Image: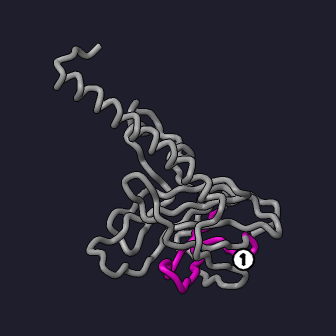
Amino acid sequence: MKDGQTYSLWVSEAEVAPEGGSLKAPDLVALVEWRGKLVFESAVSRGALVGHWEPFVMRGGDLIGGGPVNTSAVQNVGRVRLQSGESVVVGVFDERLVSRRFLGGFEVPLAVLHLGVNEIKGGGWVSRLQITVAPEDGNLPKEVPRFAVAHGVRELSEMPASMKDRFARTNERLEDLVRQGVERGKELLDKVLGGGEER
């Protein structure tokens, strides 16, 4: 990889340790931040100890119209520019109904990544993570090279502050929506039970 070049990257796989006492495997989702901004968010891998994600996501709306599909519109990858000293932060979460629980993550210097599949081993709940890096157009050779990456990688046992802030704002909005829904439901119930008319 060359300094100053733009690359596509995505979390292609994450393996988590089974949680004691839980009968259900987590619903895994992976996020990547670069320069403090979210550049990649995976789809949810439901009920999985090994989440696997491809770089393309077809949505129903992409198929409507019958014409050609713009491949950049269906790519689910992050784009980063390699600059010395910069890192990406990867977080793996258990997707809940109204929140996400942090399972673990890594801070990975961009300079240690290679074109291909980069595998990182962890000692926490996230025991293994694969970050795939491709040229900006997303094209990789048929035989994708694999690399073990450890040098300079820092395992995260706590959610990074930038992700905490993001989820705090999201959770506040969700709590407001739930509160408004409950209040509206009470009003409707009062009107029905009290014989009042809905306006």
The three-letter amino acid code for the residue at tag 1 is Val
Q: Mainly helix, strand or loop, the magenta region?
A: strand
Query: What is the quadrant of the C terminus in the image?
Result: top left
- Residue at 50% x, 67% y is 102
Residue 155 within the magenta-colored segment of the rendering: no
Measured as percent of width and height from the top left, residue 82 is found at: 77, 63
Q: Is residue 8 visible?
A: no
Q: Which residue is nearer to you in this view: 94 or 54? A: 94
Report helix, strand or loop for mark 1.
Answer: helix
Residue 130 within the magenta-colored segment of the rendering: yes
Residue 111 appears left or right of 105:
right
List the residue tagged with mark 1: 112
Residue 23 appears left or right of 113:
left
- Residue at 57% x, 74% y is 117
Q: Which residue is nearer to you in this view: 83 or 64? A: 83
Q: Quarter of the image holding residue 138?
A: bottom right
Q: Give the range drawn in magenta.
A: 110-134
Q: Which residue is nearer to you in this view: 160 or 39? A: 160
Measured as percent of width and height from the top left, residue 31 is found at: 55, 60
Q: Quarter of the image holding residue 137?
A: bottom right
Query: What is the quadrant of the N terminus in the image?
Result: bottom right
